[in-house]
Amino acid sequence: MVMDDERIVTEVAKAYLKALGYATEVAGNGTEAIEMYKNAERAGSPFDIVILDLTVPGGMGGEETIVKLLEIDPQVKAIVASGYSDDPIITNYAQNGFMGALIKPYTLEELHAVLSGIARHVQKK
């Protein structure tokens, strides 16, 4: 799942993820993302990974959303995305509940590298 308030960002992310073999759903804010996550869990088809935009004007962004998702699923695999590379949540993503970080705009190769890093981390456990 990709959560971002900018349609162009979600369209690019969906195209990148499709190229990497992932099916993707999109949420416009954290409230919507949490509901979608719960519904997917209930349906027995949980999301493999979520990408959360750090800042959503007028809505719940990634920082608040990850707290709620961790309450639902302590094993959630989440990536934080932001255009602000110096934001403390980005620079300390692991301490904030995320398994990776992306600086927008990110490339297909950068997304693949983060996803691969998470997959390696999960396999080690």
Image (spheres, rainbow, N blue to C red):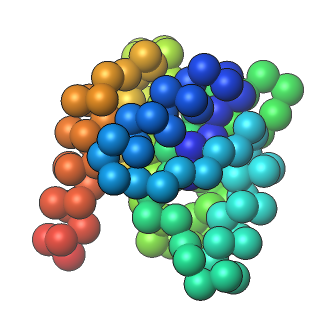
Name above or below for residue 55 compared with residue 34.
above
Q: Position of residue 31 (x, y in %)?
A: 80, 50
Horizontal side of 62 relative to 30 (left or right) equals left
- Image: 88 above or below 77: above
Image position of 114 with respect to 116: above or below: above
Q: Name the residue: 52% across, 65% down.
A: 47
Q: Position of residue 101 (x, y in %)?
A: 38, 36
On the question of residue 34 being in view, the answer is yes
Task: Measuring from the top left, give residue 51's x and y in whole percent.
Answer: 50, 44
Q: Say whether residue 27 is left or right of residue 82.
A: right
x 57%, y 65%: residue:
70
**Nearest the camera: 20 or 109?**
20
The total number of labels drawn is 0
Residue under the image location 45 percent in, 71 percent down? 75
The quadrant the C terminus occupies is bottom left
Tell me if I can see residue 96 in this picture: no
Measured as percent of width and height from the top left, residue 123 is found at 18, 71
Q: Residue at x 78, y 22 (%)?
A: 57
> Viewer-proximal residue, 62 or 25?
25
In front of the other: 16 or 47: 16
